[in-house]
Every structure is written in C-alpha cells, then in structure tokens.
Image: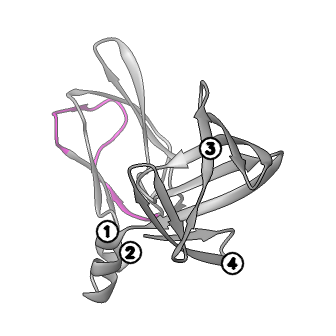
Amino acid sequence: MNVKVNDRYNFDVELEQKLLKVDGVELQIDSTTLADGHTHVIYNNKSYNIELVSEDKAEKKSVVKVNGTLYEVAIEDQYDLLLKQLGLDNTKANKMLEVKAPMPGLVLNIMVAEGQEVNKGDNLLVLEAMKMENILKSPSSGTVKKVLVNKGVKVEKNEVLIQFS
C-alpha cells in the first residue's frame, strides 16, 4: 500500500502479521497498544508515543500525533491503485446527486436554498421522526439544484428531499 504523510512524503508499506516493511526495508519495532487510540512504539532504541487524533475511513485519511507533532496520513491500498489505473477513481463519479429521507417524518426546517454551495457536513434540513429532531447533513460538497420539500410537509422513507447539480 502507498502511505502519504502531510501530502509530501510517500512510502511503500507492506504489513504481514507482525512484519513491517517500508520502502522494501524490514523494520524492527516493538509496539504496545494502549487505550483509546494510543500506542507506544520503540524503534532504534527511541520511544514514540502515538495517538490517533481523527480518522476519516471513507477518505482513508487520519491525523496522528507522534510525540506531540501532528501528521496527516493518507493510505491507498491495492484496490485504490487498481481503480486509479482503470480511471475509476474520479471523485465526480462519487458526487452526490440527491439526499433522501432516511425515515418517514415531518420537515421542521430547511437550512439551504436553491443555488447555494454546501460543504460536506453542512446542515441541510431538520426532519422530525418519532418525536425526535434529526438534522440531515450534506454527505459531500456541491451546489443545491432543487429543494423538493417545504417546511411542515410529511415525507416518506427514501423520498428525495434535495437534488444537487
């Protein structure tokens, strides 16, 4: 797999059971997994405290803290590399086109308008279901093409609420 650190350094990493190779060189490390995303590693007689700060599994990116310094780490496995070779890694192919109601409910509030740019994680609307308010968030960045519902309207599960261009 290919590991990229801080968008600058690329490493070819192989991990088989307890054997770790980086750029073809076998590394002798001693590691202990601690609680809550913390690991202690000894390499070349030096001690490293490693903490997983954040992880985005969909994007295969993480932020780790090593002895107090933050590093952004991105990983591409053999499947990612194969998709790239086949030209199927185009992010526009994965672009959202619509947001559907995850459950039946009542639209309490609409927080976006047609033509508005949204980022991944932005609030789109509030849906009340089973006396609970659920905020639907944008799964990716894009532009709102059409809002298909109005405030106060009941919707069914899988009903298209918002379309994107």
Q: Which residue is mark 3?
A: 30
What residue is at 50 percent from the left and 55 percent from the top?
120
Residue 91 badge: 2
Within the magenta stretch, is there residue 90? no
The quadrant in which residue 14 appears is: bottom left
Mark 1 highlights which residue? 94
Give the distance between the C-alpha atoms of the residues marked 1 and 4, in whole angstroms: 25 Å
- Name the kind of residue labelled 3 in the image: Asp
Identify residue for label 4: 8
Q: Quadrant of residue 90?
A: bottom left
Q: Position of residue 6 (x, y in %)?
A: 69, 68
Q: Is residue 2 left or right of residue 147?
A: right
Q: Is residue 140 above or below residue 67?
A: below
Contact (Cβ within 8 Å) of mark 2 with mark 3: no
Nearer the observer: mark 1 or 3; the answer is 3
Q: Are marks 1 and 2 in contact (CB under 8 Å)?
A: yes
Q: Is residue 89 visible?
A: no
* Tag in front: 1 or 4: 4
Q: Secondary structure at mark 4?
A: loop
Which residue is nearer to you in this view: 97 or 163? 97
- Which stretch did the figure color magenta? 142-159
